Amino acid sequence: MTDSTATTSKKEVTQQRTLKDMLLANVRSYGIFLALVVVILVFQGLTGGRLLTPNNVVALFQQNAYVMITAIGMLMVIIATDIDLSVGSVIAFVGGIGAIAMRDWGMNWFLAVIIMLLIGLLIGAFQGFWVAYVGVPGFVTTLGGMLLFRGLATVIAGESIPVSDNTFRSIASAYLPNIFGFWGNLDGLTVVVGLVCIIAYIVLQFRARNKAVKNGLQAEPTSYVVLKCVLVALIGGYFTVLLAQSGNETSGGIPVSLLIIVLLIAIYWFVLNRTVYGRNVYAIGGNRRAAILSGIDTRRTEFCIFLNMGFLEGVASVITLSRLASATAQTGQSFEMDAIAACFIGGTAVTGGIGTIPGAMVGALIMGVLNQGLSIMGVNAAWVSVIKGLVVIFAVAYDILSKRSKH
């Protein structure tokens, strides 16, 4: 064996070991994604292949949009070591106001949406005031809010209030206009968007690696980056084709509700990871006393957390009312439990200070797949609650045990 061959072999072995080390180091981070894949495959089998039909994939996002949207706000609340138990009640109350505004006040659907978002912000400010400036624990404040707003929802929407405005009703069911036409049986816009997203992910991954190498920082091995890009391309391409086949002969592809979810994810990911406010949220959850000593305005930060929660509850109420096309006092039952469960399943620490938007979204998707799969199978609602409860317990137990094993 020549010296050059030996050197090459040594580099290959080093790279293989590095790839192995990277996979082992990130097994917990990517474990939640693997869990999502397993859950999908299990229900794909149990439902006889019906879970991943194009229209059921779209329905997964449309029917579980409330989980993903409220999980974003709940993530920030839990990171800061608080909790919000009033989510479902607030959605019911805000939805009732929106329905009355359109039916009884003759309000334009757009103005009704603005009113709903503003009421959500006011409720967030109300609860944030008690938590941040008065010192009432978030659990107690939102428990009171749960009772308060459920009662108000019953008062204003004791009977079902229908929504007849077709434009408003289409928010949760409409698709983006197919400006590229149909390519066979595929929605052209969906294919283009899917390809752009996959290419953008690949470019950003290699750019990040090259930047790390250029700056003399520890970079991910090329094989690891390639593996990630291949997996994302395969999975992203598969779901792009499914979305492109959804809908009917005149419309289909990317639902408006999915666009809203993606925009919110992008905005709040940037807020949590690229702004001073986001760092303050993590600092409060990691060590509140140290955050105060370092000069962070914990009261203002905590107030803004609940303000954001109220805004996202307003958005969720718009989509929920649009999908149901009527407001009732029972709307939103257990929505807060789904949001909390999504965060814990996605790796958010019970003790605060740890959690990510992608993790919470994967947790929300797992909850959505459970809801969708069990619904397709016709499982009784009581057993659905039992299964979801067990999933939450196992997720939190796994988080605690994995942390304990590191010490």
Image (cartoon, helix red, strand yellow):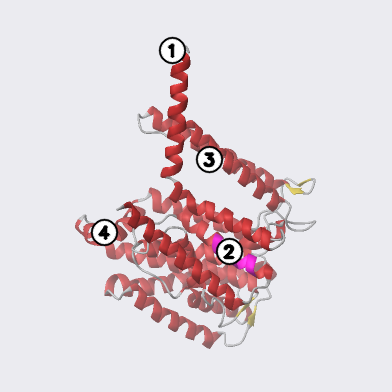
Residue 165 placement (x, y as % from top left) = 67, 72
| Residue position marked by numbered label 2 in the rendering | 368
Tell which tag, 1 or 4, sits nearer the viewer.
1
| Residue position marked by numbered label 1 in the rendering | 3
Classified by dominant secondary structure, the portion drawn in magenta counts as: helix
User: Residue visible at 48% across and 13% down?
Assistant: 1
Q: Is residue 221 visible?
A: no
Residue 329 placement (x, y as % from top left) = 55, 83
Residue 299 placement (x, y as % from top left) = 28, 65
Residue 195 placement (x, y as % from top left) = 64, 41
Q: Is residue 134 visible?
A: yes
- Sequence-earlier tag: 4 or 3: 3
Q: Quadrant of residue 138?
A: bottom left
Q: Which amino acid does the dot numbered 4 rest on?
A: Asn
Q: Nearer the viewer, residue 40 or 180?
A: 40
**Distance of mark 3 from mark 1, alpha carbons?**
33 Å
Q: Which residues are magenta?
A: 366-374
Q: Secondary structure at mark 4?
A: loop
